[in-house]
Amino acid sequence: MNPDWIYGLVGGMLIGTGGAVYLLANGRIMGASGIIGGLVDGSGRSTMLERISFLAGLALIPVVLLYFLGPKETHATSNFALLIAAGLLVGVGTRLANGCTSGHGVCGISRMSLRGMVATVFYILAGGLTVVLFRHLLGII
């Protein structure tokens, strides 16, 4: 039996729990792009330690899990230029949408926010269209 779906389920539960804890502890929505954006543009100086701690957790937890669970197979491309371009495009998109999948998708939908639901639908549509375009039509990925 392939247990990969269990990792997705547990990961989703951890993200949801993290979003709830962040909201209950700080009274703010856990949106990764907003947390990073506040560090980049300087608007989050008053909560800099909190923001850096959040980002450190995002970076360190996968390293800890790698140690205990070992490497897992992914279907990500090994083309680093493509990965960098994709990351930059996601960053620009989150700024245009005033939030990211963690803010709109996880926290917005759980709060029954119409704006969060609409943004999440468009994120999913854009991701699907990107896969169709780059993988199936252009054969780049």
Image: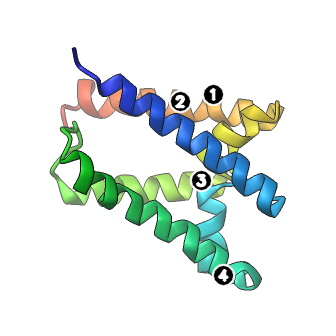
Q: Is residue 98 visible?
A: no
Between the C-alphas of marks 3 and 4, the distance is 20 Å
Residue at far front of view? 68
Residue receiving disc 2: 124
Residue plotted at (52% across, 68% down): 55
Residue plotted at (71% across, 56% down): 22
Between the C-alphas of marks 2 and 4, the distance is 31 Å
- Mark 2 element type: helix
Tag 2–tag 1 contact (CB < 8 Å): yes
Residue plotted at (65% across, 37% down): 105
Residue receiving disc 3: 94
Residue receiving disc 4: 48
Percent x, y for residue 129? 43, 28
Between the C-alphas of marks 1 and 3, the distance is 14 Å
- Mark 3 element type: helix
Q: Is residue 94 visible?
A: yes
